[in-house]
Image: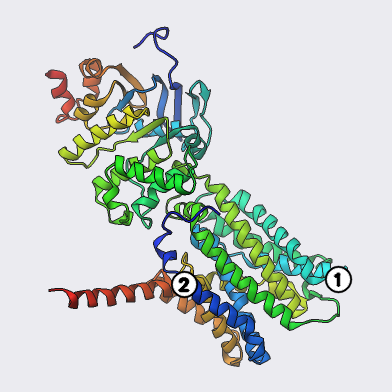
């Protein structure tokens, strides 16, 4: 853990965040800070509470208790659209394109209604720029429902970027991608960070998340079991134990090497 | 509205060209010079249907929020006009207030109902419209179930005909404008995936309320013109649940969420109804016919006649493309 005094003011601060669904405690008092310009990985076994964490951050779920601060201002309890206007956006693990719209129209939704609230030509310019960044220009006029899974994953990122976020929360954008697509996605994530956007990413693909993250948070059963640099985290015995049930998990190889 | 710089959604794009729209409009406005009163009455009815169907389509089609309570707005418009006319106000001067009251009433339904996801909005609209009908039948200022008559005065069908036609044209044009631009994009996003829309910064409640208010105001205007034409308003006619159902049926038959669909649906529906109502055996059973038609549309082409047409065009293109090939 980085001592508080050494760290500059974090862009995002999660304090003792809990979320309870009926009898199930999905998040039990999770705290962490994300510095501006970081790529911050979130890993953990299935059901660890990763997606719930993202949902609470962007406001599509209301936390049961705890605080979420964005640039030292509380944002917990704000509706999703209001959080997007402030500059935090998320993508969905299961892609949710507007299937009847073209790729370009999908991206324009972010440009029109995100933090920038672009109109007219400005929205078009923004949309075209993002389509280029995400490598979707050649598919701009395709109906979203006809895209491949790799393209749909990129469309999720493109739409989110179009909202002009300061923080982007990527929920398993590499799931279902082939090795070369994963390399492309890693380079896209670095490009996003280099453009000044802080990146939070949930990722099951351990090699990718270790390769690209500055810091990693590990959740298990709704609780933080580790946080640190990728090297620290993969060497942590508790993290290894958490993954032991999954005997083919690459984390074990990573930790052993 | 914002500049139409982004390409509109693929369905509105196949809209009736503006020139055809202008020609039909001109023809309809000149119709009193060469058509008899009976035919003009039929056109009046069709125009009334077009207003209801296209207005409903702004919320029900573009934004996907199905209301089965639109007769409430017809009633609000009609009663506003009759009640004020009885106080000595010129009936046509009551139109703006009718529109405002219709919009305000839409907030009353939408503010609580739009917070809920799923079919709750639809259920609430049925309940509210029935409650309004019962209320209007029970209180004295509406004349109770026997209704109210407009004050005796000079009634000019020509003025009413022109007003209805102009309103119908305006509603069609407004739908075309609203379906493009940022507003239409937001409604389309809400219809396709409301959570994804919220996740990209769309305040879905606000857009739904706005779409509801716009369509409610337009329907209330139609209700006012309806009252002026019939010189009489009663809960049994303007708050009729069957009227609410008809308003939903028209866009569904024609093609929900499209521009031409509700117009097409309204023309066919209104015209059939005019013809069927003159056949005594069908007088009370015409809704069965529409029920059957509804089931057919749902089973075979959920996008209605417009969807059927698009499929036909695609098939023809495929065939001609095949002969062009090597």
- Classed neighbour count for the residue bearing mark 2: other residues with Cα under 10 Å, few (<14), some (14–19), many (≥20): few
Question: Looking at the image, which residue is at 88% across and 68% down?
Answer: B87
Count of marks placed on residues: 2
Q: Quadrant of the N terminus of chain A?
A: top left
Instruction: Identify whether B213 is placed above or below A253.
Output: below
Subunit that carries the residue with mark 2: B
Q: Is residue A1 left or right of residue B83?
A: left
Tell me the quadrant of the picture where the C terminus of chain A can be found: top left
Q: Which tag, 2 or 1, sits closer to the chain's start? A: 2
* Residue B197, above or below A171: below
Whole-number angstrom distance, CA of label 2 to CA of label 1: 43 Å
Colour approach in the figure = rainbow
Nearest the eye: B297 or A83: A83
Q: Position of residue A151 (x, y in %)?
A: 26, 47
The residue identified by callout 2 is: B17
Q: Quadrant of residue A52?
A: top left
Determine the chain carrying the residue at label 1.
Answer: B
Spot occupied by residue A190 in the image (x, y as percentages of width and height): 28, 29
In the image, A117 versus B119, the foreground residue is: A117
Look at the numbered disc 1 and give the secondary structure of its residue: helix
Give how far across and how far down residue B227 sits, in percent.
Answer: 74, 74
Do marks 2 and 1 both belong to one polypeptide chain? yes
Is residue B177 visible from the viewing direction of this image?
A: yes
Q: Answer left or right for B203 relative to A178.
A: right
Which residue is denoted by mark 1 in the rendering? B86
Q: Nearer the viewer, residue B164 or B31?
A: B31
Left or right of A10 in this view: A47: left
Residue B317 is drawn in which quadrant? bottom left
Q: Nearer the viewer, residue A236 or A171?
A: A171
Residue at image point 50% right, 71% down:
B18
């Amino acid at each position: 853990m980085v001592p508080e005094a050494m760290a500059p003011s974090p862009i995002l601060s999660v304090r003792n965040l809990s979320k309870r669904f009926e009898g199930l405690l999905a998040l039990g008092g999770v705290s962490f800070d994300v510095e501006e310009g970081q790529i911050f990985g979130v890993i953990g076994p299935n059901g660890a509470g990763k997606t719930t964490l993202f949902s609470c951050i962007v406001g599509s779920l209301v936390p049961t208790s705890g605080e979420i601060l964005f640039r030292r201002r509380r944002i917990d309890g704000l509706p999703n659209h209001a959080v997007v206007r402030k500059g935090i956006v998320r993508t969905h693990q299961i892609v949710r394109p507007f299937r009847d719209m073209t790729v370009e129209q999908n991206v324009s939704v972010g440009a029109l209604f995100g933090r920038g609230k672009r109109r007219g030509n400005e929205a078009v310019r923004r949309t075209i720029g993002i389509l280029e960044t995400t490598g979707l220009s050649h598919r701009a006029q395709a109906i979203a429902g006809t895209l491949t899974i790799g393209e749909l994953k990129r469309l999720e990122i493109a739409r989110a970027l179009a909202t002009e976020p300061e923080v982007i929360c990527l929920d398993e954008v590499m799931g279902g991608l082939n090795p070369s697509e994963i390399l492309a996605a890693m380079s896209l994530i670095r490009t996003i960070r280099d453009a000044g956007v802080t990146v939070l990413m949930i990722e099951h693909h351990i090699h990718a998340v270790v390769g690209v993250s500055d810091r990693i948070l590990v959740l298990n059963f709704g609780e933080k079991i580790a946080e640190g640099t990728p090297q620290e985290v993969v060497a942590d015995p508790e993290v290894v134990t958490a993954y032991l049930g999954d005997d083919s998990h690459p984390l074990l190889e990573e930790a052993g090497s | 509205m914002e500049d139409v710089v982004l390409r509109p959604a693929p369905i509105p794009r196949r809209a009736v060209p503006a020139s055809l729209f202008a020609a039909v409009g001109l023809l309809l406005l000149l119709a009193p010079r060469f058509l008899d009163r009976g035919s003009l009455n039929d056109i009046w009815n069709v125009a009334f249907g077009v207003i209801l169907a296209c207005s409903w389509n702004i919320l029900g089609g573009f934004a996907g929020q199905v209301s089965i309570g639109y007769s409430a707005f017809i009633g609000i418009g009609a009663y506003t006009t009759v009640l004020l006319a009885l106080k000595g106000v010129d009936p046509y001067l009551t139109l703006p207030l009718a529109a405002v009251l219709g919009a305000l009433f839409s907030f009353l339904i939408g503010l609580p109902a739009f917070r809920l996801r799923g079919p709750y909005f639809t259920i609430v609209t049925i309940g509210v419209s029935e409650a309004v009908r019962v209320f209007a039948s029970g209180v004295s200022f509406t004349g109770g179930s026997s209704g109210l008559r407009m004050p005796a005065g000079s009634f000019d069908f020509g003025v009413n005909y022109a007003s209805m036609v102009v309103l119908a044209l305006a509603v069609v044009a407004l739908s075309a404008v609203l379906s493009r631009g940022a507003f239409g994009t937001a409604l389309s996003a809400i219809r396709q995936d409301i959570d994804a829309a919220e996740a990209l910064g769309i305040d879905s409640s606000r857009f739904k309320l706005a779409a509801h208010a716009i369509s409610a105001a337009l329907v209330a205007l139609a209700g006012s013109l309806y009252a002026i034409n019939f010189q009489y308003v009663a809960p049994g006619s303007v708050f009729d649940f069957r009227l609410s159902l008809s308003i939903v049926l028209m866009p569904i038959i024609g093609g929900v969420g499209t521009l031409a669909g509700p117009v097409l649906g309204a023309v066919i529906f209104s015209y059939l109804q005019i013809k069927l109502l003159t056949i005594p055996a069908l007088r009370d059973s015409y809704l069965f016919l529409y029920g059957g038609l509804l089931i057919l549309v749902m089973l075979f082409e959920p996008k209605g006649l417009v969807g059927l047409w698009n499929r036909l065009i695609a098939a023809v293109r495929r065939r001609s493309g095949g002969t062009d090939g090597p």
